[in-house]
Amino acid sequence: MSRSTEKDPVEIPLAWILWMPVGQVRTDEAGDLVFPLAAAVPGIYRFMIDDGTAVVAGYIGQAAVSLAKRFSLYRSRGRRPSHPLERKTTSRNARCLIDALGTGHTVNVALVDAQATGPDGRAVMLDLADRAFRSSLGRRLILELCRTGIKVLNRYGNPGNRTLLNPAGGTSADLLSCRRPGYCGQGPKSLSCST
């Protein structure tokens, strides 16, 4: 078994990356977000918003220290968002999740499995605690999400964001082509988010 730190993240094909479903986000009686249980470890997570017929929006994020703490931050930001929302990703996404759930959508949560498996069965452990590795892999996964045609809630998918990163395995042109349709409330099948 090899470690990801021995490889450049670009060398690990995205087809090797497995998403482990961990459950759905819901709201409690007070309207606060409730997340499925997650370990207190670094990782990459994905929210997929489904309208009952299809996935209509997605977000890929990362936790540098603890997925459990990251999810609890979404809960607290849903209660008391930081402003301005367009610059506060966690607050903006918490509001979007609350709005989506309030209109009958479901929000599924999945985590990147720390073990990638190649077609030959070779296992590669992903060092998700390594910031550079996690960030590079996260950018590649966001680009892959952008290519699906659903709304991408990441800033990279927002037409108004002028911060261009050159993600591993993609060019700035790839990122620009990803800039559709952006945040909730834009494009077809809009989610009505309070942003």
Image (cartoon, grey):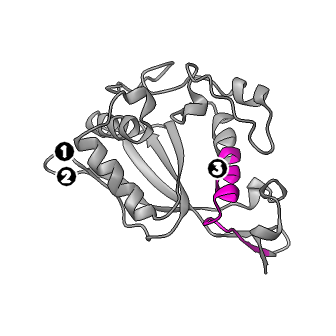
Q: Is residue 25 visible?
A: yes
Q: Which residue occupies 29% across, 50% down? A: 75
**Three-letter amino acid code of the residue under disc 3:** Gly
**Which span of residues is magenta-colored?**
123-140
Q: Residues within 10 Å of mark 1 (few under 14, many from 20)?
A: some
Q: Counting residues from the N terminus, which is met first, the one under dot 1 or under dot 3?
A: 1
Query: Which residue has dot 1 on it?
Result: 31
Q: CA distance from mark 2 to mark 1?
A: 5 Å
Q: Which residue occupies 45% across, 64% down? A: 66
Frontmost residue, 97 versus 44: 44
Q: Is residue 150 visible?
A: no
Q: Which mark is residue 138?
A: 3
Element under disc 1? loop
Q: Which residue occupies 33% across, 57% down? A: 72
Asked if the residue at tag 1 contacts the one at tag 2, i.e. Cβ–Cβ closer than 8 Å, the answer is yes
Q: Residue furthest left?
A: 29
Give percent across and percent down for residue 192.
35, 24
Is residue 169 one of those drawn in magenta?
A: no
Give percent across and percent down for residue 51.
41, 36
Q: Which mark is residue 28?
A: 2
